[in-house]
Amino acid sequence: ATPMSVMVGVGRGAKDGVLVKNAEMLEIMERVDTIVVDKTGTLTQGRPEIIAVETVGKWNEDEVLSFAAALENHSEHPLAHAIVRRAGETNRSVSDFDSITGQGIRGNVDTHNVLVGNSTLIDEQTKGSTERSQIDAKAREYQKRNATVVYVAIDGELAGILAIADPIKESTPAALATLHDLGLRVVMLTGDAQGTAQSVAEELGIDEFHAGVSPDEKLNFIRELKNQGKVVAMAGDGINDAPALAEANVGIAMGTGTGVAIESAGITLVGGDLRGIAAATNLSRKTMRNIR
Ligand code: ADP
Ligand code: MG
């Protein structure tokens, strides 16, 4: 049976926007020593917006945008929404659409073959070209400013990049400071590029992070920590975080995130405020002390 004070603790958490699925989660939270966090939509607001378009070659800004947006119309990725919003309506026709999870999308737009995604996705077609080195240098500049860079290739040639900003949530710095004060180890995992990950991690004082991480790799990372005897809480918001949230000792979903993430987690933070992790830890420590 669940002790009365744990039930009280669960109720108290709810008042602070920390929704605990079952009493066991509150009990485990006391023993958590490692917090793994996703970047996009967890540390950041998850409302990405295009801040710049850079082109190379024969296609202009509007053309690059509209080719990319035509394809992104078929994608559910948060970056896709940013691109479609910025481009507005397009009447280009799409065929043979294909999504490469964790990398991007490809397909035919009108009579052209188009790739939209991270640098790896376009490597085969553009690696080693002069245009590529020029654009990579620009990409690094945007990444240093925390932006995500999406590459666009048209008919096998680099056409440009879209720089997409997703600001850090206002509550994130204080939330991380408190976690560090509580003596917890914080690790960031992201599917985004090394440059962007490093810049965000530096700004937030996170010294341990891994970039270019696939959903499977997130899951394996958690599994490995558990094998080392760590007690792990994982905080995330996306479909790509769901397997890792389910594997963690405590999965913590953003209430602002996707339903799949919330279903996979034991704790949900209403409004996605990460200060809820420290609140849950404190609540757990206090509650468990009361029982003993
Ligand atoms: P995350 O959401 O953690 O950034 P993902 O695994 O969803 O990671 O994606 C990793 C990277 O793949 C993105 O940063 C982006 O560069 C690229 N990518 C994935 N899907 C798309 C898409 N639909 N359009 C453009 N780029 C994409
Ligand atoms: Mg995310």
Image (cartoon, rainbow, N blue to C red):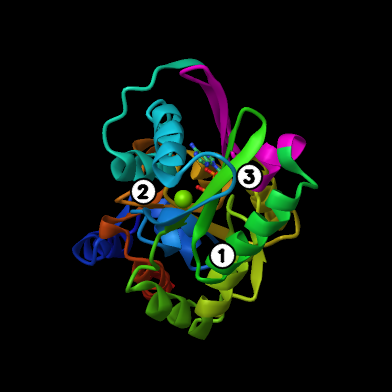
Outermost residue, left side: 15
Of residues 61 and 65, which is closer to you in this image? Answer: 61
Q: Nearer the viewer, mark 3 or mark 2?
A: 3
Outermost residue, bottom side: 181
Identity, as a three-letter code, of the amino acid under mark 2: Asn
Which mark is on residue 44? none
Disc 3 secondary structure class: helix
Identity, as a three-letter code, of the amino acid under mark 3: Leu
Identity, as a three-letter code, of the amino acid under mark 1: Gln
Q: Nearer the viewer, mark 3 or mark 1?
A: 1
Label 2 crowd (10 A; few <14 / some 14-19 / many >=20): some
> CA gap, disc 3 to disc 2?
22 Å
Q: Circle 2 sits on which residue? A: 22
User: In terms of image quadrants, where is residue 231?
Assistant: bottom right
* Disc with the residue nearer the chain's start (1 vs 2): 2
User: In terms of image quadrants, where is residue 114?
Assistant: top right
Of residues 262 and 50, which is closer to you in this image? Answer: 50
- The magenta-colored residue range is 97-125
Q: Is mark 1 within 8 Å of ligand 1?
A: no
Disc 2 secondary structure class: loop
Q: Circle 1 sits on which residue? A: 143
* Disc with the residue nearer the chain's start (3 vs 2): 2
